[in-house]
Amino acid sequence: MRTHRRTHRRSARVEYHLPDEAQSARRARRLTAQFLARPALRAGGLDAGHIGDAAALIVSELVTNATRHGGGCRLCLHVSETQVTVEVYDGSPGRPDVRPLTTWSESGRGLAMVRSLAQRLDIARVAGGGNRVRAVLDL
């Protein structure tokens, strides 16, 4: 007879609503750092220092874009045993595009930077209007 050991998967999810303000990106970075530093997540093996910097930069870029182009936004963070997922929802009528990086551009580098940091980036229209931008970081 063979016994199976049951493992408990640790995951956590949080959601924040952020207003259309310049301070929202800074607040989102702080909330992300606090969420990733939770003792329960560290006990589950999450190295907040390792993944936290990339997640904070991604959150900052996505929230900045959402508040600039779509009014306020909703930030969702999800941590599982294998990845950190950042989702930002906005109310913009337009769809965000990843522009090619050029040396002379003054703006438009945010999504390209997010794409280079994340293992996966996807952008989708949301029923009822707006967009969802999701970036996934592997642990």
Image (cartoon, helix red, strand yellow):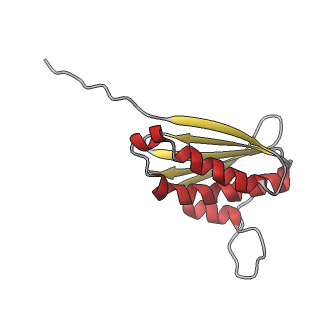
Above or below — where is 98 with respect to 47?
below
Residue 55 or residue 111, whichever sits in front: 55
Residue 113 or residue 74, whichever sits in front: 74
Q: Residue at x 83, y 44 (%)?
A: 91
As drawn, the residue found furthest toward the bottom would be 104
Q: Is residue 121 left or right of residue 25?
A: left
Residue 97 or residue 21, whichever sits in front: 21
Q: Residue at x 69, y 59 (%)?
A: 61
As drawn, the residue found furthest toward the top would be 1
Above or below — where is 72 with respect to 25?
above
Q: Residue at x 37, y 29 (%)?
A: 8
Kindly indicate the quadrant of the structure image that contains residue 17: top right
Q: Is residue 23 left or right of residue 31?
A: right
How far across and how far down the image is residue 100, in percent? 69, 70
Task: Please indicate, yes or no, whether residue 135 appears anywhere in the rendered image.
Answer: no
How far across and how far down the image is residue 129, in percent? 83, 39
Kindly indicate the quadrant of the structure image that contains residue 124: top right
How far across and how far down the image is residue 128, in percent? 83, 34
Q: Is residue 125 left or right of residue 34?
A: right
Kindly indicate the quadrant of the structure image that contains residue 73: top right
**Quadrant in the picture for the N terminus:** top left
How far across and how far down the image is residue 94, in percent? 84, 52
Task: Please indicate, yes or no, whether residue 38 appears anywhere in the rendered image.
Answer: yes
